[in-house]
């Protein structure tokens, strides 16, 4: 899809479904960058993560030390980091669900993130029990933040000639796509709870078909537009660079 086509499509959607553009937030891809590494913007998610998670880890450490006096300094810090990792492991599947129903290519890249986080949590627990290594503890927090926060906050692999306006259009397209999925899900639930003899049943059935068709169309449009402004995976990026 071309930039102008997407712009026209979004204008039509704005007129037909204004609710799709209100209070409909996506918790991923807040920063879009070109290629694999793109200047200083690469550090923004890490800076933000350090400002959020480091103070939380120290506060939790103090809480654990004050409430569980038998814990050592290392154990209190390790449990604080483990709590952060568990929180990320609970949140990530919700973000993955948004991605799964709004961006096919990005879902293919990030779908294994919950498994990676689960492995990190297990390794963190083993470190507390056996190794008790400060280096391993902080290294696991680094990888946990990478898999559970940074990779969702930042989306890379966009083409060198891509523009900020195209990033905005892609994000808006994904928002409406996920909104259409939620509407079809809610309508399907209402249909399930409505009697087949009720006059409302046929109305809901038509609504479900409309939302399902809209979701399917937008999901395909997002993927086509994404391919025009972004490298779908690292292999395609390297092929073009080499």
Image (cartoon, rainbow, N blue to C red):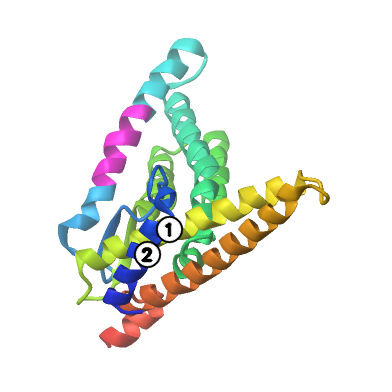
Q: Residue at x 58, y 63 (%)?
A: 210
Q: Position of residue 80 (x, y in %)?
A: 45, 29
Instruction: Please identify the residue farthest to the front as the structure is shown.
Output: 199
Q: Position of residue 129 (x, y in %)?
A: 57, 35
Residue 187 included in the magenta stretch of the image: no
Query: What crowding class fits label 2: few (fewer than 14 Cα within 10 Å), some (14-19), or many (20 or more)?
Result: few
Residue 50 included in the magenta stretch of the image: yes
Left or right: 81 in relation to 4: right
Query: What crowding class fits label 1: few (fewer than 14 Cα within 10 Å), some (14-19), or many (20 or more)?
Result: few
Screen quadrant of the C terminus: bottom left
Screen quadrant of the N terminus: bottom left
Viewer can see residue 6: yes
Q: Position of residue 184 (x, y in %)?
A: 60, 55
Q: Residue 222 got which mark?
A: none
Question: Could you say which quadrant of the image residue 12 lies in?
Answer: bottom left
Left or right: 203 in relation to 15: right
Tell which of 231 and 112 is nearer to you: 231
Q: How many numbered markers are drawn?
A: 2
Labels 2 and 1 touching (C-beta < 8 A): yes
Instruction: Give the answer, above or below, for where 226 lies relative to 53.
Output: below
Tell which of 96 and 126 is nearer to you: 96
Q: Which residue is mark 1?
A: 16
The answer for how far apart the CA atoms under marks 2 and 1 are is 6 Å
Q: Which residue is mark 2?
A: 12
Q: Which residues are magenta?
A: 46-56
């Amino acid at each position: 899809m071309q930039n102008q086509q997407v712009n026209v499509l979004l204008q039509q959607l704005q007129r037909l479904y204004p609710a799709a553009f209100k209070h409909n937030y996506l918790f991923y891809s807040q920063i879009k960058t070109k290629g694999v590494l793109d200047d200083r913007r690469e550090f923004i998610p890490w800076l933000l993560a350090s400002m959020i998670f480091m103070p939380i880890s120290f506060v939790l450490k103090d809480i654990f030390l004050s409430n569980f006096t038998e814990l050592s300094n290392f154990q209190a810090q390790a449990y604080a980091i483990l709590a952060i990792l568990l929180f990320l492991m609970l949140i990530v599947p919700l973000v993955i669900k948004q991605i799964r129903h709004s961006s096919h290519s990005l879902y293919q890249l990030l779908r294994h993130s919950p498994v990676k986080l689960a492995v990190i949590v297990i390794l963190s627990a083993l470190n507390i029990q056996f190794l008790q290594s400060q280096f391993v503890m902080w290294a696991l927090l680094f990888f946990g933040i990478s898999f559970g926060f940074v990779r969702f906050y930042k989306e890379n692999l966009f083409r060198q000639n891509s523009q900020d306006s195209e990033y905005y259009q892609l994000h808006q397209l994904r928002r409406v796509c996920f909104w259409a999925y939620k509407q079809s899900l809610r309508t399907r639930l209402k249909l399930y709870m409505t009697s087949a003899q009720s006059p409302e049943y046929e109305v809901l059935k038509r609504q479900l078909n409309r939302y399902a068709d809209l979701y399917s169309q937008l999901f395909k449009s997002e993927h086509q537009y994404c391919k025009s402004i972004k490298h779908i995976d690292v292999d395609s990026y390297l092929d073009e660079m080499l």
